[in-house]
Image (spheres, helix red, strand yellow):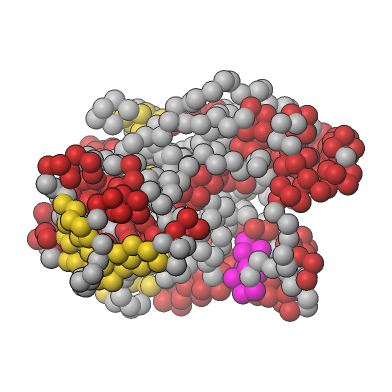
Amino acid sequence: MVGASRVNEVRINPLLYFEQVFWNSGRMHAVYNGEITLAALSLIVWIGSAQAAPNPATDATRKANDAVANFLPFSNKQDFEDVHRGFIADLPSPVIKGKAGNTVIDLSQYEFLKKKGPVPASVNPSLWRQSQLLATSGLFKVVNGIYQVRNIDLANITFIRGEKGWVVIDPLTSTETAKAALDLINSKVENLPVTGVIFTHSHIDHFAGIRAIVDEKDVRSGKVPLIAPDGFMEEAVSENIFAGNVMSRRASYMYGNLLPRSPQGNVGDGLGLTTAAGNITLIEPNKLIKKTGETLTVDGVDLVFLMAPDTEAPAEMLFYFSQYKAIDLAEDANHTLHNILTLRGAKVRSAQKWSSALSQVIDMWGKDAVVSFGSHHWPQWGNQRVVEHLEKQRDLYKYINDQTLRMANQGLTMNEIAEQFVLPDSLAKEFYNRGYYGNLKHNVRATYQLYLGFWDANPANFDPLPPVEEAKKYVEMVGANKMIATAKAAYNKGEYRWAATVANKVVFADPTNQLARNVEADALEQMGYQAESGPVRNFYLSGAQELRGGMKKMAPSNASSHDIIRGMTLDSFLDFLAIHLNGPKVGDKSYAYNLRFPDIKTEYVLTVKNGVMNYSKGKQMDKADGTVTLNRSTLDDIAMGKLKLGNLTESGDVTITGDKAKFKEMLSNFDKFDFWFAIAEP
């Protein structure tokens, strides 16, 4: 998640982004993102006028969607049987609220997915099918002793019946949804304490509800084992910090947070419907799994682990319950093609490692397993179906890896490979291999990038002009009116990719040209209607919406997580601060200050020189410009917005000795990042 929250990411993968440098403004707003990305996903408030009405699907779009309907085996209803299998109960209400009365998630927004009738022409029929499946929520029995609450958040929460209580796997994105799930199983199955918790991986939709189900003192004492893969804390806190602002803004497109929930707008994310916008928490695990084959017994439940780092998440593991003959697939095998490179942006993942991990699952447990389930979607029952699902998901990622490299070695470039890439029918006609969350072309390009970088080796493309300058030269050469006419003609012929490309040049040359904006928006909209991937659809439709009506800024929630801020190391905090330094402004200046944190008995030297901020831990400089002293707990409170630096210097909570004026001057050279930068226009 998946990581943001998959705006509130998430897809967090979680993850914290500080909107402002704490001492430059006196406070920080915390915004999260994951594989979800949770940046601005919380409490959406519109600022601006109503959006223009969407266009209907064109004949070209209907034809493209009909082709999908004719290609895939829609007569196969197995998935519809499986999503209802073992149903016990639904939530008392489709709306989950926080203590302050805020709406954390409102599943009634997606009721339109449950209506019977023909597939809307404005939605790819394959994506519509997936979204209808994901609209089935509630408490389900997987097998006797294993239960899941599904689709009340982006991820699933799983409950294993131990000897004395529930062993919980992946407690969702917020405390509110995690509590609702725990209350549901306690009221409908058996009222038991939580006797163990497992985090499958480091994305925020799989851990952030933790404080709703366990008390931290019970974890710290060891009374309740909290188990995670090696590297979990580092990745959970830091994965998206450094590029957090840009990832979060892109996530607002990826998850369609500004789109209406409707057949012309957001129909879900393919991995789930949507992410909860509630209270985000984190407790440090007291048990880390470090190697494949490691075993553990939790409240009488025997587990065998398989490490899968650098697959769907940097820190991830899968495991097996021998007494149930059940495999927990975490997020490495799903009912969708996942992301090799998420659209919000992240480090590229390895399709080869992903495939290898699934191959290990088959080797270790494929002979005996009778059920498999994961952190998203619904289970597989029966050994034959379990193994076939694993094999075809394995081969999907292996095919992407191997065939991308085969074609690259023949001299084809990244975009040429993506355009020609076709899966064999044996893989492509499996619904669980379709690109509902990931996208085949995008994953092929990502695999090329992993091995060869983004450049195609054509010297003419080595140093391209920036988008605005290039666009202006195209318009100067051809003329805006002729380019708009060309884009309109392409649109009328159903050539939406070309229409969007040409119109976008005019928009970047002159963003006030509303005619060009409208033509591009019309083209993007039809591509969105045709998209099989939920995130791709959301990107197209979000771009169209902003081109037509301008950027409609939201007032993001100021909700933040002290747990995640506290989980940051000081080194990570200072690394993140260094990214905010405006190097060109300080290229000829130098600053040096000692930092002291008495409560944790830690000291640093912080220097700015050559346009770069550096720091050294455990050192102090005799000839520094001054010394700043504050507790780490005070820094956390400043980061949370609970305290302001100006007041603290007066109260004595922060002391600055030496050249205070120079310190203030240094701080003025740290940039504030604007979340609402443009995407579909300059």
Magenta segment: 443-452
Can I make out residue 529 in this image?
no
In the image, 669 versus 458, the foreground residue is 669
Residue at x-position 33% and y-position 31%: 96
Q: How far from the left and from the top, in percent, is residue 399?
A: 65, 70
On screen, residue 557 versus residue 362, left or right, reads left
Image-quadrant location for residue 164: bottom left
On screen, residue 658 versus residue 181, left or right, reads left
Q: How far from the left and from the top, in percent, is residue 155?
A: 41, 48
Q: How far from the left and from the top, in percent, is residue 619?
A: 21, 73
Q: How far from the left and from the top, in percent, is residue 336?
A: 56, 54
Residue at x-position 59% and y-position 70%: 450
Q: How many marks?
A: 0
Can I make out residue 256 in this image?
yes
Magenta span: chief secondary structure:
helix
Residue at x-position 24% and y-position 56%: 659
In the image, 681 versus 89, the foreground residue is 681
On screen, residue 158 versus residue 435, left or right, reads left
- For residue 514: magenta? no
Q: Is residue 307 above or below residue 541?
A: below
In the image, 647 versus 86, the foreground residue is 647
- For residue 451: magenta? yes
* Quarter of the rendering occupied by the C terminus: top right
Residue at x-position 33% and y-position 66%: 607
In the image, 320 versus 561, the foreground residue is 561
Image-quadrant location for residue 322: bottom left
